[in-house]
Image: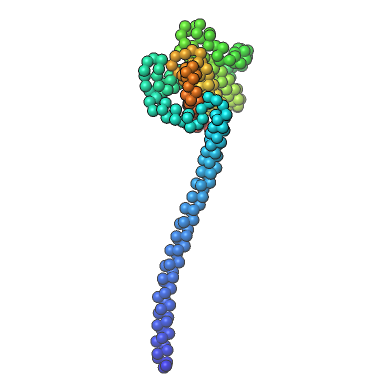
Amino acid sequence: MNVVSLKQEKSAQAVNIASAQPVMAVVTPLSTTATSASAPKSAAWAATSRRVFEWGLPPVIGLMIFAAIWAVVAALTQGLPGPLSTWHAAVVLFSDPFYINNPNDMGIGWNILSSLKRVATGFGLAAIVGIPMGFIIGRYHFMSRMAAPIISLLKPVSPLAWLPIGLLVFKAADPAAIWVIFITAVWPMVINTAVGVSKVPQDYMNVAKVLNLSEWKVVTKILLPSVMPYLMTGVRLAMGAAWLVIVAAEMLTGGLGIGFWVWDEWNNLNVEHIIIAIFIVGIVGLLLEQCLVLLAKRYSYE
């Protein structure tokens, strides 16, 4: 082989190598980009799976254990329905929740709405009275000392003990039940609001005096933002107590409502419906609690 042919062969090899290098340069970044793009997706999927495992799986396991215990107790107790029979009864019950046959035979939906209406009325009246009273008691020491023996005396009284007084004064079952809700819900609002007002730093009040702020501005600009966490705690406690006592009050007063519906189903020996009513009361109470939590976050001054 002569020198010229060797040079030509080396030149051809050099051209092949040079032409191959850009291909390598193009292929390598593409593979790296694909790997880096798949990494965040894998991390996001792992984080989602971990959240589902931490927050979704435990409640499911808890409900399954509860249903299993319920089924065992129902199998050992004569007349107590199990989860499956209760579920079938609930499907039938909620297939037409707003039927009306007569004033004494109405769907479960009307009974729930009637109870919520009573709770809303009594709770609203308690808020109108209790929150301003809590501001006054917490703001002025004289009013606090004057109200202390009354609150200490009346707060421990069972809510149902007030029902005969309501029947005597109002001469009707519906306002008597609302009265019981009111007297139950007013104390948490008064006490928590008063405690919140008393916890306001004195430096804030001294600044208000220096600025010569009116009482309205003191309440809206200083007291209300500071008291809001205490106030919302009182509101949540009041709502829980109001929804708790309405069932017992309606059992005694009769008429339309979830409490009366439970008592009526017991008289008919329909235990499945009683268990369904227990779940209804719990679910509605949970929803009311969550609504108040969202409201507290919405109007939080923190």
Q: Residue at x 58, y 20 (%)?
A: 191
Q: Residue at x 51, y 50 (%)?
A: 46
Find the residue positioned furthest to the bottom. Answer: 2
Residue 4 is drawn in which quadrant? bottom left
Q: Nearer the viewer, residue 15 or 205?
A: 15
Q: Position of residue 179 (x, y in %)?
A: 50, 13
User: Residue 65: horizontal and vertical position, in percent?
Assistant: 56, 36
Q: Residue at 55%, 11% (x, y): give it.
A: 162
x, y percent for residue 34: 45, 60
Pick whichever, 159 or 9, lies toward us.
Answer: 159
Q: Is residue 34 above or below residue 68?
A: below
Residue shown at the point (47%, 53%) measured from the top left: 41
Number of dots carrying numbers: 0
**Quadrant of the image for the N terminus?**
bottom left
Q: Is residue 177 above or below residue 12?
A: above
On the question of residue 271 being in view, the answer is yes
Seen in the image, is 227 located left or right of residue 107? right
